[in-house]
Amino acid sequence: MPAAVLRSSGLEIYGSGAGTAPVERIMEAMPQFIAYAVSGKLHIDVKTVHLSQVENAWHDKDDDNRRIVFVP
């Protein structure tokens, strides 16, 4: 994937979350994942929460299954 694609997308990835997936499986899926991301079809539904609201978000019982992304 050209670096410009990631730089122009505003995408920031922090942390890890490979879970129990074996490294071999992750590497096998990576070309397809990258192609999907480059195509512009990748969409991840997130809930943005201001950093000042970390405590509230941590205890929030929101059941919409969106990932929380903390923003400054």
Image (cartoon, helix red, strand yellow):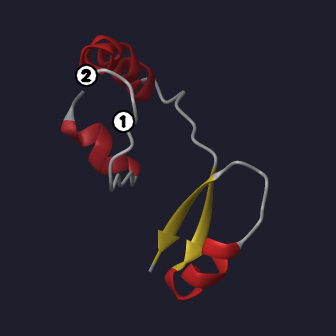
Image coords of residue 6 (percent x, y): 30, 43
User: Residue 16 appears at what percent x and percent y?
Assistant: 33, 47
Q: How far across and how far down the image is residue 25, in percent?
A: 32, 14
Would you say 49 lies left or right of 65 here? left
Label 1 sits on residue:
18
Q: Residue at position x 44%, y 21% from top?
A: 36
Q: Is residue 60 left or right of residue 19?
A: right
Q: State the image coordinates of residue 14 (x, y, percent, origin top left).
A: 33, 56
Which residue in the rendered view is the most extreme toward the bottom? Answer: 52
Residue toward you, 54 or 10: 54
Contact between labelled residues 1 and 2, with CB atoms less than 8 Å apart: yes
Q: CA distance from mark 2 to mark 1?
A: 8 Å
Q: Amino acid at mark 1?
A: Ala
Q: Residue at x 63, y 46 (%)?
A: 45
Work out whether residue 46 or residue 7 is closer to the camera in this orientation and state it. 46
Label 2: which secondary element = helix
Residue 37, image quadrant: top left
Mark 2: amino acid: Val
Left or right: 4 in relation to 19 = left
The image quadrant where one finds the N terminus is top left
- Rate crowding at label 2 as few (under 14), some (14 to 19) or many (20 or more) other CA atoms within 10 Å: few
- Please tell me which residue is depicted at 31% across the width and 38% down the height of the picture: 5
Above-or-below relation of 6 to 40: below
Mark 1, residues whose alpha carbon is within 10 Å: few (<14), some, or many (≥20)? few
Q: Is residue 70 above or below residue 5?
A: below
Q: Is residue 33 above or below residue 70?
A: above
**Disc 1 secondary structure class:** loop
On the image, numbered disc 2 is attached to which residue? 23
Q: How many marks?
A: 2
Tag shown at residue 46:
none
Residue 15's quadrant in the figure?
A: bottom left
The residue closer to the viewer here, 58 or 46, is: 58
